[in-house]
């Protein structure tokens, strides 16, 4: 485990009473080091720990002058930017709780969270988000981050105005206030985005999150020198814990990606050492690499295939506790110069590892990046568990699993194969929902995750599916869609896949082709809508389905499929912020296509 001044990092976290103290320890130890950075005017602007601490203090004083105090709730709705972290820590420093709201939510969803959480006010990024709030809450207090905003009034303040107010009127007892916040106090209430049902407010304490940080730094070799690229929404607990709280507790630097589209460019500019993300990013990277290799000269394709095969051979030897022989070591050294270093250069050249969470990572993708010297550490957890329950360890990865439980986390397999967990990482409960809170736990106090899984003989946890996701065919057969969908999206011409069939005779699928790959294969510039009706495309997709599903039982394989002309998206309400498919929305939107798949059956 990495050391800092002779102390294990996990042990040093145990002494911290709250998340604000965790930040200010580094304000004192590393005042001039870069804490946050963002892109502006064509370059990266950096904020030191000292400056971050000053901004948090001034904004907190400004909010205190507006009446925010211990026990309040403050909503926060913005894309990732420095003001997000400043607001989050400032809110908590007053003994209040941060209530994140995804900036992609619709007005009625925003209204539900503001009312249900009993938020005192909401901090929003820009006028567009202000407009959404005002559609449902005309007089609700709002603070707007964007410097360009000019419509300030009694109920709508500029972030800068609140900040300047705190600068002019410091809160004299501020350090005493946050110094007195205990681990058992509420740090945040997060509303589960969910693929079904109304969002519920998950109450997490400072101890929940700090205990999770302890477990993470015991399992993963993080160090203060690490540079994080932040690209998942901070509104989600995965990025908030793994990409913000862990980084700023250990004294690392965080660079905010400009957008998902700009990630490839930002990777090369920032040259991060750690990047937390969801499997969708790695699937797209994998597809692009495979596509470029398929278009290259025959010799290059053979060389790349041989290099990946050698890397996978090394991984499989390691699983059996064996080291590569002389011939394999020679090949790996050769491929390192000719193939692997080019893949790593695309990530900036100094990436130590990716972190994957939020959904299942296909083992094939994990093995591919391992072979290229870009390891992916897949983990597992939920909002209710702060979030990490388990994760793979660097050098001990077992792809197809979500690794070993954290040292301070208990895991067991309960009734119906459900994964259950117990420990300091588990939420206090759902806000104002005592019955739902009680239903989330077993009689003996274990949290019910709702996921189906198993623990292998080495203690590694494997996720099979969600209990609610199981497809029960009219024949009585049960189908777990997640492993099949995950396998399908690794195919060269498939971008997204959703399995259907609950209550039906057979499984079918909605497929979004990878239209760029399809165009290249068919040497055409046709639009997606036209390609979705092209029989040649159907033949390509059918071959991909046959290949992907060869390992599954006959009743698990899609018998029919429909091609969609565009990808599922958050903007259309079909994906959660962590890119999980909202089945109810998709089934309603594509009801016609689905019924045609079962016509006459």
Image (cartoon, grey):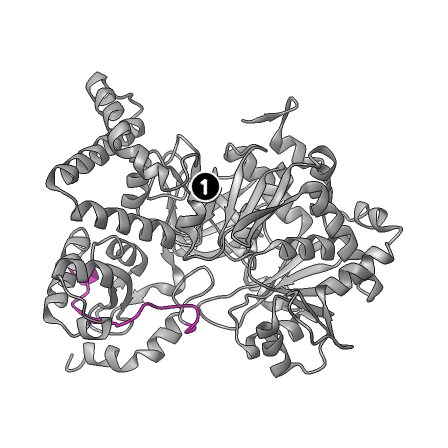
The answer to whether 341 appears left or right of 422 in the picture is left
**x, y percentage for residue 461?**
40, 43
Instruction: State left or right for residue 521 relative to residue 97.
Output: left
View extreme (top): residue = 326
Query: In the figure, residue 369 lies in which quadrant?
Result: top left
Q: Main secondary structure of the magenta part?
A: loop
Please give the name of the residue rendered at 33% of the width and 63% of the height, measured from the top-left corner: 470
Residue 117 painted magenta: no
Q: Nearer the viewer, residue 487 or 418?
A: 487
Q: Tell me residue 577's x, y (percent).
A: 47, 63
Which quadrant does the N terminus fall into? top right
Q: Quadrant of the C terminus?
A: bottom left
Image quadrant where residue 469 sits: bottom left
Q: Give 77 or 320, whichever is nearer the viewer.
A: 77
The quadrant in which residue 485 appears is bottom left
**Label 1: which residue?**
391
Q: Which residues are magenta?
A: 554-573
Q: Is residue 564 magenta?
A: yes
Q: Position of residue 534 (x, y in %)?
A: 13, 72
Q: Secondary structure at mark 1?
A: strand
Q: Is residue 76 visible?
A: yes
x%, y% of residue 520? 17, 58
Q: Can residue 379 be seen here?
A: no
Which of 599/22 is in front? Answer: 22
């Amino acid at each position: 485990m990495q050391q800092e001044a002779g102390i294990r990092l996990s042990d040093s976290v145990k002494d911290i009473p709250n998340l604000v103290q965790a930040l200010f320890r580094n304000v004192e130890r590393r005042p001039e080091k870069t804490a946050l950075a963002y892109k502006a005017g064509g370059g990266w602007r950096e904020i030191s720990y000292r400056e971050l601490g000053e901004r948090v203090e001034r904004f907190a004083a400004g909010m205190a002058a507006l009446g925010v105090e211990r026990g309040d709730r403050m909503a926060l709705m913005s894309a990732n930017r420095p003001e997000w972290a400043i607001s989050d820590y400032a809110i908590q420093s007053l003994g209040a709780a941060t209530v994140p709201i995804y900036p992609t939510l619709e007005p009625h969803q925003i209204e539900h969270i503001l009312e249900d959480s009993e938020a005192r006010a909401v901090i929003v990024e820009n006028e567009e988000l202000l407009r959404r709030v005002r559609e449902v809450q005309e007089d609700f207090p709002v603070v707007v981050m964007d410097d360009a905003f000019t419509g300030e009034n009694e109920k709508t303040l500029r972030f800068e105005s609140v900040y300047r107010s705190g600068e002019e009127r410091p809160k004299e007892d501020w350090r005493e206030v946050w110094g007195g916040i205990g681990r058992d106090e509420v740090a945040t209430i997060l509303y589960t985005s969910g693929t079904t049902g109304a969002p519920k407010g998950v109450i997490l304490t400072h101890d929940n999150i700090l205990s999770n940080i302890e477990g993470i730094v015991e399992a993963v070799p993080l160090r203060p020198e690490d540079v994080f690229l932040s690209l998942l929404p901070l509104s989600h607990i995965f990025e908030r814990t793994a990409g913000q709280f862990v980084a700023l507790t250990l004294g690392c630097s965080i660079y905010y990606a400009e957008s998902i589209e700009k990630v490839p460019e930002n990777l090369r500019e920032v040259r991060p050492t750690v990047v937390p993300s969801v499997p969708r990013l790695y699937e797209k990277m994998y597809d692009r690499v495979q596509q470029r290799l398929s278009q290259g000269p025959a010799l290059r394709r053979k060389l790349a295939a041989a290099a990946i095969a050698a890397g996978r051979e090394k991984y499989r030897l390691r699983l059996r506790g064996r080291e590569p022989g002389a011939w394999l070591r020679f090949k790996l050294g050769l491929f390192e110069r000719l193939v692997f270093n080019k893949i790593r250069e695309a990530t900036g050249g100094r990436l130590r590892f990716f972190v994957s969470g939020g959904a299942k990572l296909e083992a094939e993708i994990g093995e591919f990046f391992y072979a290229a010297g870009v390891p992916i550490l897949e983990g597992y957890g939920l909002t209710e568990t702060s979030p990490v329950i388990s994760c793979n360890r660097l050098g001990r990865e077992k792809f197809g699993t979500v690794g070993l439980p954290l040292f301070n986390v208990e895991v067991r397999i309960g009734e119906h194969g459900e994964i259950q967990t117990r420990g300091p990482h588990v939420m206090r409960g759902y806000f104002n929902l005592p019955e739902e809170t009680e239903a989330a736990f077993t009689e003996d106090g274990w949290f019910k995750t709702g996921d189906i899984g198993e623990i292998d003989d080495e203690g590694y946890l494997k996720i099979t599916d969600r209990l609610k996701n199981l497809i029960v065919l009219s024949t009585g057969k049960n189908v777990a869609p997640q492993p099949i969908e995950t396998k399908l999206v690794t195919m060269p011409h498939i971008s997204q896949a959703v399995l259907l069939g609950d209550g039906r005779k057979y499984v079918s699928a909605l497929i979004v082709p990878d239209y760029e790959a399809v165009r290249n294969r068919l040497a055409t510039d046709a639009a997606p809508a036209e390609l979705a009706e092209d029989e040649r495309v159907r033949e390509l997709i059918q071959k991909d389905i046959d290949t992907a599903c060869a390992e599954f039982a006959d009743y698990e394989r899609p018998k029919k499929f429909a091609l969609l002309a565009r990808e599922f998206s958050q903007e259309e309400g079909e994906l959660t912020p962590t890119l999980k498919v909202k089945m109810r929305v998709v089934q309603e939107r594509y009801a016609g296509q689905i019924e045609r798949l079962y016509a006459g059956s």
